[in-house]
Structure formats: structure tokens, C-alpha cells
Amino acid sequence: MSDLVIRRATEDDLAAIVAMLADDPLGATRETPDDLGPYRTAYAALAADPRQHLVVAERAGRAVGTLQLTVVPGLSRRGAERALVEAVRVHADERGSGLGSELVRWAVDEARRLGCTLVQLTSDASRTDAHRFYERLGFTASHVGFKQTL
């Protein structure tokens, strides 16, 4: 993976990122790659917040993976900061190459570098392959998550 670069995403990466978000059964129902307007608004908020780290994995000048790392301050765990990993996606051409592992390892290392004491993530209950993937990387399914769509 020596030809892989993980870097902060730019607005120019939005089309590639949204395409990756939309390229699975769940994302296909909730993403709109043909309308980048809402994503540009969201990107502006992310770019302005130093606790948000939207990154792309780039190979040969092409975005082939992405994730968002958010640093969350808190009172629990003696005021510890935790990192939240969201929207891990790998381009279809790169799946099975080890890129997803590389991205998640980057996120864990970056969280540690930023002083976080815990890294957490959620994965849709239907994504059983993803659950096995995260467990292989050392994550534990220790909690039950709840969401409410607004």
C-alpha cells in the first residue's frame, strides 16, 4: 500500500466521496450523487470545524476510499475525548485489497495522536460482513446503538 496517500478531503473530492457513499444497497436509497448541493453545504461545515477530519485515500491521483473521524469531547471517562469513525467506504474496484483496513488503522492512529482515549463506530445491523471486518481490526461489539430518524 506504499502508493496510497490518506489526506484531508477537499471540495473537489465531493463527487467521488458521494459516489462511494451511494455505491451500496443502503447508500443507494439515501444519497443523491447527481445533486452535490447538500454535500457542499455539509463539507463547508466540516472544513470549518477542527474536530472534523474528512479524509480520502488516494491512489494514482484517484480517490478510492473515504472516512470521517470526529473528535468528541465529553465528561465521562474523566473528561476523555473520544473519536467517532463514520462513513467508511472503499471504491468497488479496491474492495478486498486491504484498503479498508488501512483506512481504519489510520483513523485509530490519528485518534491516538489527537489524544483520544477511545475510538467508536456504528455499523448498520444489516452489514454483517462489516461487523466481522471491524472485529478483525480489534473493535468489540460492546454496545447496542439506537437511532431516530428526524
Image: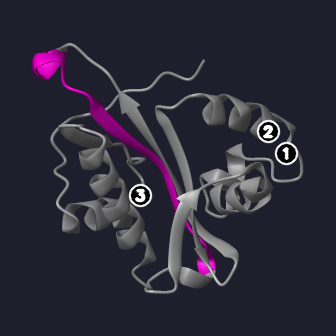
Q: Range of the magenta residues?
A: 76-92
148 lies above or below 29: above
**Type of residue at label 2?**
Arg
Question: Which residue extends farthest top?
Answer: 75
- Of circles 3 and 1, the one toward us is 1
Marking on residue 36: 1
Coordinates of residue 146 in the picture (x, y in percent): 36, 27
Within the image, what quadrant is residue 120 found in?
top left
Q: Which mark is residue 127?
A: 3
Q: How is the image coloured?
A: one colour
Q: Badges 2 and 1: C-beta atoms under 8 Å apart?
A: yes
Q: Amino acid at mark 3?
A: Arg
17 horizontally vs 36: left or right: left
Residue drawn where x is 56% and y is 23% of the image: 149
Judged from the image, the secondary structure of the residue bearing numbered disc 2 is: helix
Q: Where residue 31 sits: x, y (%)?
A: 73, 47
Residue at horizontal 31%, vertical 21%? 73
Q: Secondary structure at mark 1?
A: loop
Three-letter amino acid code at disc 1?
Leu
Q: Residue at x 76, y 40 (%)?
A: 39
Question: Residue 25, percent across and down?
Answer: 61, 59
As drawn, the label of residue 40 is 2
Q: Is residue 138 left or right of residue 127?
A: left
Q: Quadrant of the N terminus?
A: bottom left
> Around disc 3, counting alpha carbons within 10 Å, would you say few (fewer than 14), some (14 to 19), or many (20 or more)?
few
Q: Residues within 10 Å of mark 1 (few under 14, many from 20)?
A: some
Q: Please indicate whether residue 143 sits to the left or right of residue 131 in the image.
A: left
Find the distance from the CA under tag 2 to the CA under tag 1: 6 Å
Quadrant of the snapshot with the C terminus: top right
**Horizontal placement of 102 versus 12: left or right?**
left
